[in-house]
Image: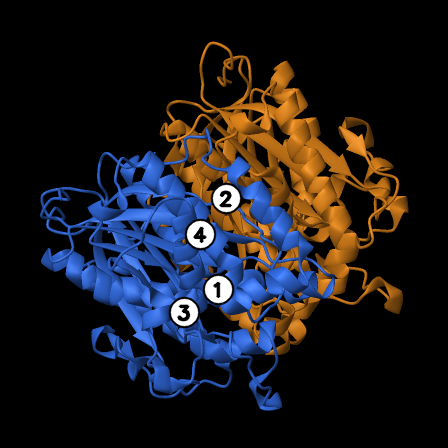
Chain colours: A orange, B blue
């Protein structure tokens, strides 16, 4: 938190100005929540991660851990494609369905022109809806998949998101070979892929967790322009969506067994707690950030994990497991994404961010 | 066509192999069509183009023509953002709505991490669903907007797509300053932005064109890997979606006043005609390609226009005008997108392509 405060005082008039403006922008009169009355079910899931993630505190929950970051492929990009393929096929198998049973796939990733996703889907042969929400991709995918199933257009929709440390560093910062030093407020892009199958609610699927509502995010920008400090940039976007969720869903922060943000990291989630407290909402023990819990302190990832896969893998392992068993009755999942490109930052632009939310309930009733 | 044939014979075993496999992949048993029984209406539209486009055959139909490619901004990227802003605000005004009446915006563009779209939406302050379908973005947006409105989640959804010759050349090929020579099968990225407002069908909106169905695309790859030859790469994707549409919608090719593809260009649309003929379907005078008609032969654009804006601007001007007046009773709009990145091509990958379709009918009944 101190880092953010310091940069605010020293050099960023824009930050202070935007902060002052913010109260005017929310609460919004706009009704943003989408309610899924037919409660689409998440009937299959899979999470694939790299070696570093498998050695972190969440390691035991992931479905598959890859020990080679290139997975025997020629490039890191090819390895990321392989992980998506593995996660999607695994999720479909977990749902006891075949590839041909899937009506459409909704997916995205961090790479330019979303090549990971496109190449993976090309080989899978499923009709595709490409989405881009940076690290918020998994919640954007779940939201759209739930809406397509809830309204009866399709029976089975698979959604997926992925990221890879080496491909993301090469594209957004520096190729690993340069050996650049990372600042203490940097985060570590998670190597992995997560996939979920969302299906119509019926007698066969009613024992699975259900998606009951979703909220599309508003693009928020407090004037942060440091490509390494994603947590500080994204916290205001999480604030906006979380605040909207708590004012429009009818649930208070205590009605959730877990409120999960994507990849704010240690610094970003501290900022979010502060921002929420200013709004009169105290986030308690039931608030976690996936970026904050995916690595151990001694793994030298500074503020924690980031990337689409950070929350996509934890949602499709730990969180889904607890929802399926009924240990969690209701959770809110708000992944956050930073929507800049290297080019926009070179041209002096600040970092616009977004956070989409989904509310998921256990099959054993969501009452608290 | 001769160019495509030659490359097929000389150097690309992959092309021949994929072509031979293709008949096995379609017709697909998968029911892909989404039908919108509540017939969402397109109640507002706007198209903004650059100077070159305004001097082409479609010039008189566009809502606004910019004479300066930088629009007084410091960078081409900023100019593209301004065009999206102008198009979206114009479409909302055209629908006689205010920004606050719009529930959500669905948009995308060609730039890395879709920065045009994100920065434009940040300034507009509308909740956002980011999509990526390269040049197929406008149909992907219309499809999702129609599904969100048709199923009653939202009342008014705006969708938009944009491209800019200078930003696209810099990113995908070479910065303009290099003065590189373009091969005869190249296309010219359209500078422009198009936006549509999709609203619930009711007494006020029933006089506007309606979206009755949509088909998400399948990613198709015949092995083309020439970044300049987008038409040849994308034609098979258009084939797949068009064939699916004609087998699943209940309409034959003669039931449409116009079948419109996005930006196959002269070469690509000739290839599509050939591919469709091999499937026993003859595309007649009612088939046009936006890339093929946006520039005059003497404008030196070789195979024609390309980019998200190519079909987005023509749909939101010429085609919407004819639908609103009732001159067109029913049209099919299939924009096509090439999903590669420069990095994927450097790494030796071929170009995967996609085409999404929407079927739009005049308010004066769609019967033919």
Q: Does residue A257 appear to the left or right of B154 in the view shown?
A: right
Compared with B58, B308 (above or below) is: above
Secondary structure of the residue carrying numbered label 3:
helix
Q: Which residue is mark 3?
A: B266
**Quick one: B60 or A5, which is closer to the camera?**
B60
Helix, strand or loop under label 4: helix
- Label 1 close to label 3 by CB (< 8 Å): yes
Q: Which mark is residue B218?
A: 2
Query: Are discs 2 and 4 less than 8 Å apart at CB?
Result: no
Is label 4 on the same chain as label 1?
yes
- Single out the mark in the foreground, 1 or 2: 1
Residue B301 pos. (x, y %): 43, 80
Residue B166 visible? The answer is yes
The reply to whether residue A281 is in sight is no
Q: Chain of mark 3?
A: B
Please state the chain letter of the residue tagged with numbered disc 1 in the rendered image: B
Q: Which residue is mark 4?
A: B275
Q: Is residue A305 above or below residue A314?
A: below
Q: Earlier in the sequence, mark 3 or mark 4?
A: 3
| C-alpha distance separating marks 3 and 2 | 23 Å
Question: Could you say where residue B320 lies in the image, as x and y percent from the top left?
Answer: 21, 60
Chain on which label 4 sits: B
Q: CA distance from mark 4 to mark 1?
A: 13 Å
Residue B136: x, y in percent? Answer: 44, 56
Q: Secondary structure at mark 1?
A: helix
Q: Quadrant of residue B22?
A: top right
Asked whether disc 4 touches disc 1, contact meaning CB atoms under 8 Å apart, the reply is no
Residue with the mark numbered 1:
B231
Q: Quadrant of the C terminus of chain B?
A: top left
Between label 3 and label 4, give the one nearer the viewer: 4
Depth order, front residue of B358/A269 = B358
Q: Are marks 1 and 3 on the same chain?
A: yes
């Amino acid at each position: 938190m101190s880092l953010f405060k310091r940069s605010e005082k020293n050099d960023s008039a824009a930050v202070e100005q935007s902060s002052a403006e913010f109260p005017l922008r929310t609460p919004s009169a706009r009704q943003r929540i989408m309610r899924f009355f037919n409660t689409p079910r998440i009937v299959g899931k899979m999470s694939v991660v790299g070696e570093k993630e498998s050695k972190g505190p969440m390691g035991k929950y992931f479905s598959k851990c890859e020990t080679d970051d290139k997975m025997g492929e020629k490039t890191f990009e090819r390895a990321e494609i392989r992980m998506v393929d593995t996660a999607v096929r695994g999720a479909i198998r977990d749902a006891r369905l075949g590839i041909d049973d899937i009506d459409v796939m909704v997916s995205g990733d961090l790479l330019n022109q979303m090549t990971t996703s496109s190449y993976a889907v090309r080989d899978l042969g499923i009709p595709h809806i490409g989405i881009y929400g940076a690290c918020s991709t998994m919640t954007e995918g779940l939201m759209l998949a739930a809406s397509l199933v809830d309204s009866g257009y399709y029976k089975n929709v698979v959604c997926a998101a992925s990221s890879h440390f080496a491909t993301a560093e090469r594209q957004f910062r520096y190729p690993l070979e340069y050996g650049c030093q990372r600042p203490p407020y940097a985060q570590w892009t998670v190597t992995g892929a997560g996939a979920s199958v969302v299906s119509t609610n019926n007698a066969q699927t009613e024992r699975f967790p259900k998606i009951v509502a979703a909220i599309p995010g508003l693009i928020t920008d407090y004037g942060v322009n440091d490509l390494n400090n994603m947590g500080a940039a994204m916290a205001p976007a999480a604030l906006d969506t979380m605040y909207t969720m708590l004012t429009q869903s009818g649930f208070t922060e205590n009605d959730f067994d877990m409120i999960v943000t994507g990849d704010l990291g240690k610094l970003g989630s501290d900022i979010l707690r502060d921002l929420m407290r200013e709004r009169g909402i105290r986030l308690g023990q039931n608030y976690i950030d996936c970026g904050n819990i995916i690595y151990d302190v001694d793994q030298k990832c500074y503020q924690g994990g980031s990337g689409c896969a950070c929350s996509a893998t934890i949602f499709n392992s730990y969180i889904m497991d607890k929802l399926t068993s009924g240990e969690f009755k209701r959770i809110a999942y708000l992944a956050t994404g930073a929507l800049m490109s290297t080019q926009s930052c070179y041209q002096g632009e600040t970092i616009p961010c977004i956070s989409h939310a989904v509310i998921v309930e256990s099959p054993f009733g969501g009452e608290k």
